[in-house]
Amino acid sequence: LDGVLAAIGSRFGGWSFYFEAGRPVVVHAYSQQPRHVYRVAADTAVPPGRVKLGYVFTPHGKVGEGGTLTISVDGQQIAEGVIEHTAIMPAGLGETFDTGRDTGATVIDYPGSNAFTGEIDRIEVRQALAAPRR
């Protein structure tokens, strides 16, 4: 599997949830400067077949202060990393919430096409209203 599951924003402030060589990856671009691009990636590829992929971002404090992002497959955590800063809102005039590819001004420069090569059954986005970690 390769390509983007979902993306919003651009390299000036945005998120991309994608696959690279079968491994789920999340990138958050706080700005276009390399030190402000945060990446969390699984070490191994997702097994073939139908899976439930989950991404959970737990903020460390106020908006913009960053947090911890975890990736899970069928309820089992497979990756975790810190996103040090978050953009207050996605950046880019005309940028949309994209599924199956990243259109317009992309969040990162993807290797090759960013079109998703698998099947997407459903994408569900929920906001959990939980107290920030201290």
Image: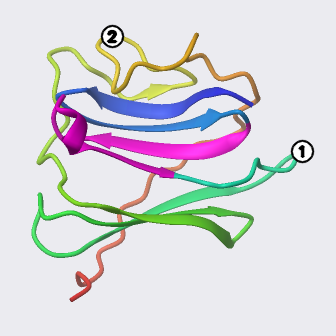
Q: Nearer the viewer, residue 119 or 37?
A: 37
- Residue 82 in percent (x, y) is at 34, 64
Q: Is residue 78 toward the left or the right of residue 107 in the image?
A: right
How far is mark 2 from mark 1, CA to CA?
Answer: 30 Å
* Residue drawn at the location 23% of the way across and 81% of the way down: 132
- Residue 118 in percent (x, y) is at 76, 28
Q: Is residue 95 toward the left or the right of residue 88 in the image?
A: right
Q: Is residue 133 above or below residue 16?
A: below
* Amino acid type at image mark 1: Gly
Kindly identify which residue carries mark 1.
49
Kindly identify which residue carries mark 2.
104
* Amino acid type at image mark 2: Gly
Mark 1 element type: loop
Quarter where residue 123 is shown: top right
Please report the bounds of the magenta region as a residue range.
22-40
Membership of 35 in magenta stretch = yes
How packed is label 1: few (under 14 Cα within 10 Å), some, or many (20 or more)?
Answer: few
Quarter where residue 129 is shown: bottom left
* Residue drawn at the location 21% of the way across and 89% of the way down: 134
